[in-house]
Image (cartoon, grey):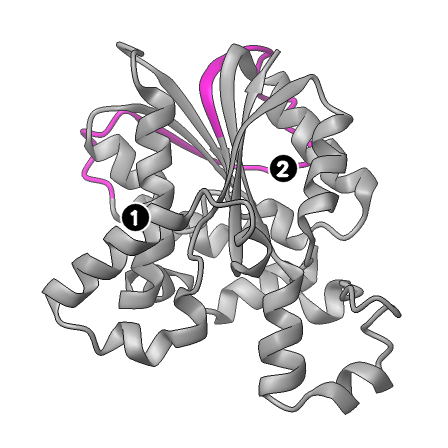
Amino acid sequence: MDYLVEYYNSYDEENRLFSRHGQVEYLTTMKYIRESLEGLEAPSILEVGAGTGRYSVALAKQGLRVTAVELVERNLDLLRAKLDGTEPITAMQGNALDLSALPDGAFDLTLVLGPLYHLYTREDKLQALSEAVRVTKPGGRILAAYCMNEPTVIQFVFAKRNLAYASERDLLTPDWHCKSDPREVFDLVRTEDIAALDAALPVERVKLIAADGATNYHREMIDAMDEESFARWMDYHFAICERQDLIGASHHTLDILRKL
């Protein structure tokens, strides 16, 4: 996975989630994390692909027990630098495809908020999801994030005038599904692709939600908003983020699953 290490060694993922438009995805994901933890007195949380710790560190600083697994050493260093030593967090290097260092049924909530962006075959996606399910307690929840196909076709292919580039590199199927591979870094899916993965696992879907909805189509507008306008945007976003007729148009989705 050298391509992935190279990408994240040069990409500022930290500031993306701190930007105004990036806050929508972050605040939405945190909302559904809190919802998934309701009724649990001392939950144990695993984040697979913890990145620089935007979620793991925030949860640990709230006193929640967190295990953070991250592939990229640079990201892990940035995560650890945020800790003062009092947080109940264990941070380790590891791969979403092999969580054998962790026992079966250990976690109430397992977060897979990045790895599925970078796995290009059904087999690898199912392996990562199967590992996440394995380490989750029966009845526990798995939150899996995806990058969606249609926003890339609309914005990258057409709005940014990359149709010739995509055609020359054979990046599109006849029905306009992006052919993802390591050259392009991100894997892109449709809602039916997510449903097909879920059907192969011992889980039931709780919700599939739009993590950022229309936000990334209007980044400049969102970033220029004052506090009151942004608060109203979040109200609007939360009012529609579970509407299934809009899910496929969101740049990021969050699949909320319960282990059977």
Instruction: Please report the bounds of the magenta region as a residue range.
Output: 83-110
Residue for badge 2: 96
Q: Is residue 180 shown left or right of residue 31?
A: right
- Residue 158 in the image: state x and y as whole percent: 65, 84
Which residue is rendered at x = 34% and y = 21% of the image? 37
Binning the other alpha carbons within 10 Å of mark 2 as few (below 14), some (14 to 19) or many (20 upward) gives many
Are the residues at dot 2 and dot 1 in contact (C-beta closer than 8 Å)?
no
In the foreground, 95 or 229: 229
State whether residue 115 is above or below residue 167: above
Q: Is residue 216 shown left or right of residue 247?
A: left
Check disc 1 and give the amino acid type: Leu
Q: In the structure shown, which secondary structural element does the residue marked by tag 2 occupy?
A: loop
- Residue 116 in the image: state x and y as whole percent: 63, 46
Q: Is residue 112 shown left or right of residue 240?
A: right
- Residue 209 in the image: state x and y as whole percent: 48, 43
Residue 201, quarter of the rendered image: top right
Residue for badge 1: 27
Which residue is rendered at x = 74% and y = 45% of the image? 193
Residue 192, quarter of the rendered image: top right
Residue 12 visible to an observer of this rendering? no
